[in-house]
Amino acid sequence: MRLLDVRAATYDEFGEAVGHEFGDLIRAHLTASRTLRECEAFDAAHGDAVAAIRARVDADFGDEMQELRGMARGAAVAEHKLFLIMVSTELLSMAAAAASSDERAPLVTTEPPGCSDVLVGPPRRALGHTEDAEASVARRGYILRAHVADDPPFLAYTYPGHLPGMAFNVTAHFTLTFNTLVPRAHGPGRPYFFVARRALKARSFDAALADL
């Protein structure tokens, strides 16, 4: 598995470095991803819902969007495609709800994937985490060992074209994994892949929880 060791002064610089280094993997994933195809179909039919999510992300996650734009530029891919896969869990769940009530809605065949954890201990502690992503992620993930701006350094297994944080991560202050439970009811909220990226900036576990 490929690893990028990077020190960046800004989020845009960090994103561009990741995109440049792993552009081949990112482009291959976007080409193969069934999840992206279904998110694009939902976007075409329900663009207002996607625009509302984008407005919330732009308002709440300025640093993370700088990083995403930098990655898109470095990988030479469309920023909107990366945004769609970053909110794919929410979009697929919304698409499934729309399909159940609207015969004209695009057919959704992909369930939002979810991972699992097993924590053992004490006295000795061990953490096991599965990565249950779609097939196009397999053999295209990579590891980032990064120090961005004044944030704590981190080590993160990262899906191609995604911001780090939503898989398995170790920071200077805690170990962090993310699993998915998709609600049946939908309302205004913050996409969890972006919440996961921000969590890597926290200087304590309590600070990460408080930001939720």
Image (cartoon, rainbow, N blue to C red):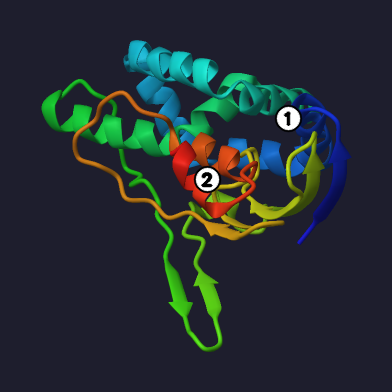
For the point 46% across and 59% down, which residue is it? 132
Tell me, yes or no, whether the two marked residues, 2 and 1, touch with CB atoms within 8 Å: no
Q: Earlier in the sequence, mark 2 or mark 1?
A: 1
**Image mark for residue 97:** none
The amino acid type of the residue labelled 1 equals Met
Residue 175 on image: x %, y %? 60, 61
Relative to 176, 143 lies left or right: right
For the point 34% across and 36% down, which residue is it? 92
Residue 184 on image: x %, y %? 19, 40
Name the foreground residue: 94 vs 172: 172
Quarter of image, res 191? top left
For the point 15% across and 24% down, which residue is it? 103
What is the number of callouts on the image?
2
For the point 47% across and 82% down, which residue is it? 120
Residue 138 on image: x %, y %? 60, 57
**Image mark for residue 71:** 1
Relative to 146, 31 lies left or right: left
Relative to 183, 135 lies left or right: right
Residue on which the image places disc 2: 208
Q: Residues within 10 Å of mark 1 (few under 14, many from 20)?
A: many
Residue 106 on image: x %, y %? 29, 26
